[in-house]
Image (cartoon, coloured by chain):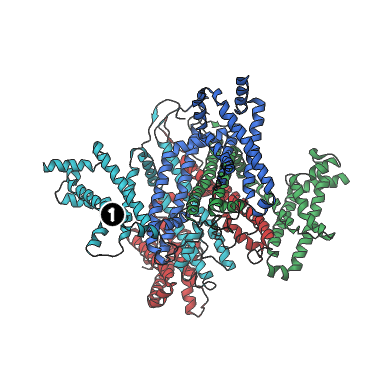
Chain colours: A blue, B green, C red, D cyan
Amino acid sequence: MYSRIRAETYRLFTPERGGRMGLVVDWFIMILIAVNVAAVILETIDSLGTQYATVFLWIEIVSVIIFTIEYVGRIWSAVEHPDYDGIVSGRVSFASRPLLIVDLLAILPFYLALVGVTAELRFLRALRLVRFLRLLKLARYSESLKAFSVVLERKKPDLIVAVFVNAMLLIVVSSAMYYIENQAQPETFSSIPQAMWWGVITLTTVGYGNTVPVTPLGQVLGALTAVLGIGLFALPASILASGFLEVARDETKECPYCGENIHNEEL
Amino acid sequence: MYSRIRAETYRLFTPERGGRMGLVVDWFIMILIAVNVAAVILETIDSLGTQYATVFLWIEIVSVIIFTIEYVGRIWSAVEHPDYDGIVSGRVSFASRPLLIVDLLAILPFYLALVGVTAELRFLRALRLVRFLRLLKLARYSESLKAFSVVLERKKPDLIVAVFVNAMLLIVVSSAMYYIENQAQPETFSSIPQAMWWGVITLTTVGYGNTVPVTPLGQVLGALTAVLGIGLFALPASILASGFLEVARDETKECPYCGENIHNEEL
Amino acid sequence: MYSRIRAETYRLFTPERGGRMGLVVDWFIMILIAVNVAAVILETIDSLGTQYATVFLWIEIVSVIIFTIEYVGRIWSAVEHPDYDGIVSGRVSFASRPLLIVDLLAILPFYLALVGVTAELRFLRALRLVRFLRLLKLARYSESLKAFSVVLERKKPDLIVAVFVNAMLLIVVSSAMYYIENQAQPETFSSIPQAMWWGVITLTTVGYGNTVPVTPLGQVLGALTAVLGIGLFALPASILASGFLEVARDETKECPYCGENIHNEEL
Amino acid sequence: MYSRIRAETYRLFTPERGGRMGLVVDWFIMILIAVNVAAVILETIDSLGTQYATVFLWIEIVSVIIFTIEYVGRIWSAVEHPDYDGIVSGRVSFASRPLLIVDLLAILPFYLALVGVTAELRFLRALRLVRFLRLLKLARYSESLKAFSVVLERKKPDLIVAVFVNAMLLIVVSSAMYYIENQAQPETFSSIPQAMWWGVITLTTVGYGNTVPVTPLGQVLGALTAVLGIGLFALPASILASGFLEVARDETKECPYCGENIHNEEL
């Protein structure tokens, strides 16, 4: 009896095997997460936060109870999976998976507040958002997601080199700007880290306009930095573009000459 | 006689079948729309709006009369088309097409103002612009438009995943920024939706500079957000680029080895 | 004698046939243009402009004399070219070529000032810059330039559609923003053309931050506009990228299977 | 004995041949550089700079001593390499290599300060960063780096033409903006070089918002400039993308028809 309930629970929280009921549970939790994320966002609007304080509180209480039941249920029934079959060790190993830790962190602040820990841990609730990633695993987009990860995997060395080159560029440009502008604007360019704030905002072409070089030499360097920022954009865009294309080309396609399917083993 | 006029009217408003006269009508209406759009834009300039008030009024009156005649004429003659051959049901079904509703909404404010409804519905006139889309259907660019829609169709899953990932990124980054900056700038980062305004403007690298993090931690997160914004750019650009290329490759081309044309059925 | 001098003059100003002497003349004029452009730029710096006023004046006088000699010489000797062999008609037709008109406009302000026309035509001197384009025609880069123009020619319909769609997007977004923000900021969003200034600066992600929506609805539309601006970037970048690749693919290349060169007639 | 030590020293500073010990030395120096760069950056933060002044001073002294030993050791042992085998001439020629000059410049300020030259040469210490480039030469990324340089080499003419066209565009746009805005904002657009600051910041879509056109004509030109800035982005991105793809295509790949490897001699 006990083991039948556990097996049933396991299937309930494993959408791939849960059948119709599992899908309903999955969608219900998805919607609950969406409601939670919306609540976390809207609650911060002062007028709404005070007026509907009770509503937000009840959403939180109900959500935490449901998430707790789900969390306990999943850990309890995890031993059904051959990978986690130790009564204790299996569950601990299951609970240590990143997504399960996220699940725990997302409900923990509520219980810590109950026992008196009132530190500002509310922001952990935002972690519930992470579970939204599961939505992407749904059938229609799983292929796109796989293509993305293949492209990223394949172009990782290129992207790392691009990041490295740009990080060095940032340090060089910011250090130089600090030495140039420090005297003219001791407040704005008070240190190299502060100059790096200017550097990132310029290289990425965001350009807030709060920290701006004012000396002629600083403006020449600033102009140069802005131009180099274009390269910063062009590199990853072109690396990813070639990645997407190579992956598309490598996928199975019919040979136009012989009619056979060509499979590329590299993937 | 009645049915001959109706058939004639139908052909007049169906450029594909209207012959020379239909083309003239089509171009005349296009130019009238252009004049209208220009009038709507220029009228808002105070100095012009008051000085040429009468001119703008007459442009409006004449345009609405012509658009009304065209609208009535098209609905009246719609029954000529085999898809809309019910005397009443056919015309209702024709009038329910999105473009026809737009046509109606674009002339309605004028008549509502006549009968006393003076609400600010003038902005509906901007809808006349939508009809400009027809210009793109002209022969020369129809192929480009088709290529665009094929690329968009083909890359839809990839683009949706990209949008989804970026939306999540926006929520995470903005929530974190709210908790970091709220104390230092309670006015600017007064709520998460307000922080999301900062988030969008930074991730898209627009960077107005009105809402800017001032705490060291906030600036580190802001710098990270600006860098992630480059990815936000690089993803759709590279997805679209690979889409355009795949479509171009799939189009009919001569096989360089055997001289035959290769057609790809996937399109 | 007269015709020998004219033939000699013609060859002097036709770098392709001018031999060693023609090259020297060509380079001398190029350098003179560079000096002129630098002078025009530096002259506007107040401290330099007053201190070296005489130097700038002499550069101008000498340059105009040399450019005038060159201009007269080229028109006089143009009849050597079979296309322009009418004594008067040939020269007029030669003088009507765009580059020759630019040459005339670049020296005209000096003579107009001499005869008393002191209108602000000095900016026409900047036209001398246009002649720099000739530099690009030098051997090494002519192939790149040709590839650029082939790509632009080939992708013209796509680019025009992209421009058209974006222009419509700009009008729609700016009109809506005008109606939304006009009441809250009657100064900044005083008219639709004024709102279009905001629209362009946001869609291109420049984001000066001088005109910014302040109402919640305006900020939602502003965020949407910023996101659409990414598409505005992604479209031409991806269209050009696919254009460059198609051109590269179409160029002559050795067939890896049969060893023959494959020429593509499409180019 | 002397020559054995020299040979040993040479191997120590030549990671490719230094074996285990050479690797340790290489990594030690890498870490020391990282510590130095971090120190240079953190030292500029006032609160840290004064509190840990002694720590920063000792890091500097120890680093300079180690870098000096390394510098002297490498020059002394350079004659082991067949290319630099003259006792004096070989060493001078080795010391003239760019990276060695950088090494010298990075330690020189310390010694100059000792002998009384107290000019602001501290910024030369930032040059130590350049040595970080060596990190990229490590095995895993060398292929990516090579691919980058192949792409840049191959697309150099295209990129130079793009830079040239954009530089001309910048001069034209800035000159025009100077003549348009100078009267309305004599401070901000005081000269063409000052207008070029605006031009670069707009063309690169950084858009600080400090110098902004205010006249209607200036705003029309500004809007045009912002739009042209998109082209400025799209060009290098699409050129690089096609470069990456061509290089990927040219690399050795198995022919799907005959099973043989196809090598492209162009690389």
Residue appearing at x 85%, y 39% in the figure: B86
Marker count (numbered): 1
Residue at horizontal 53 percent and vertical 25 percent from the top:
A259
Q: Residue furthest right?
A: B1
Left or right relative to B75: residue C220 = left
Nearer to us in this view, A177 or A141: A177
Secondary structure beneath label 1: helix
Location of mark 1 (residue): D58
Instruction: Classify residue D145 by image quadrant.
Output: top left
Would you place residue C238 above or below residue D262 in this image?
below
Seen from this angle, which residue lies furthest front?
A116
* Residue situated furthest left in the rendering: D1
Q: Position of residue D58 (x, y in %)?
A: 28, 54
Q: Residue most toward the top?
A: A1
> Is D62 in front, or is D149?
D62
D152 up-or-down from B208: above or below: above
Q: Is residue C229 left or right of residue A174?
A: right
Task: Confirm whether residue C84 shows in the render.
Answer: no
Q: Residues within 10 Å of mark 1 (few under 14, many from 20)?
A: few
In the displayed structure, B35 sits above or below C113; it is above
Closer to the camera in the image, D91 or C166: D91
What is the x, y in percent for residue A205?
Answer: 49, 55
Which quarter of the image is occupied by the N terminus of chain C? bottom left
Counting from the top left corner in percent of width and height, residue D159 is at: 42, 51
Residue type highlighted by circle 1: Trp
The quadrant where residue B51 appears = bottom right
Q: Nearer the viewer, residue B154 or D35?
A: D35
Chain of the residue where label 1 is placed in the rendered structure: D
Residue A197 appears at what percent x and percent y?
A: 45, 56
Q: Is residue D82 visible?
A: yes
Q: Residue at x 75, y 62 (%)?
A: B59
